[in-house]
Image (spheres, rainbow, N blue to C red):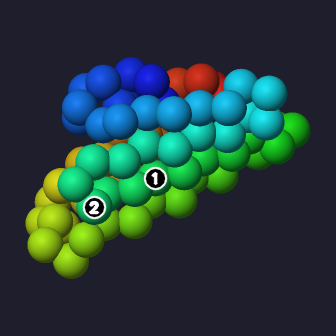
Amino acid sequence: MEHVAAKFSLDYRRDEARKTGRVSKMGVTGTYAVRGEEVTVDLKFPMLVPGSMRQKVEEDIERKLDGLFS
């Protein structure tokens, strides 16, 4: 998540003890949580963010997670 946050210049906060984190920038927010072998990612975008940008961010996250667990 740290790499994705840096790539898109997002503010990044994490709680290592709870294995959770949050990213944000100009109305875009994302949270993640690691529970056992499961990673949950929840992204929220304002209505003005183009669908192509949403898709790019989601694909980037999926690619990173697939690389970690394959």
On screen, residue 54 versus residue 24, left or right, reads: left
Residue closer to the observer: 52 or 12:
12
Q: Indicate the amino acid at tag 1.
A: Gly
Count the numbered circles shown.
2
Picture quadrant of residue 35: top right
Q: Which mark is residue 64?
A: none
Spatial separation of the CA atoms under disc 2 and disc 1 = 10 Å
Quadrant including the C terminus? top right
Taking the spot 87% from the left edge, 38% from the top edge, the residue there is 36
> Mark 1 packing: few (<14 Cα in 10 Å), some, or many (20+)?
some
**Residue 31 in the image: x percent, y percent?**
54, 51
Mark closer to the observer (2, 1)? 2
Q: Is residue 66 visible?
A: no
Instruction: Identify the disc placed on residue 30.
Output: 1
- Residue 3 lies, with reference to residue 35, above or below; the image says above
| Residue 42, position as x, y percentages in the image | 53, 59
Residue 58 visible within the image: yes
x and y percentages locating residue 68 in the rendered image = 59, 24
Identify the residue shown where x is 73% and y is 34%. Answer: 19
Q: Is residue 54 above or below residue 33?
A: below
Residue 21 falls left or right of residue 62: right
Q: Residue at x 40, y 65 (%)?
A: 44
Residue type beneath disc 2: Gly
- Placement of 37 over or under 3, stated as above or below: below
Label 1 element class: strand
Whether the residues at callouts 2 and 1 have beta carbons within 8 Å, the answer is no
**Residue at 36%, 30% in the rendered image:** 4
**Can you give x and y, in whole percent of width and height, for residue 46 in the image?**
25, 71
Residue 3 against residue 10 in the figure, above or below: above
Q: Which residue is mark 2?
A: 27
Say which element carries label 2.
loop
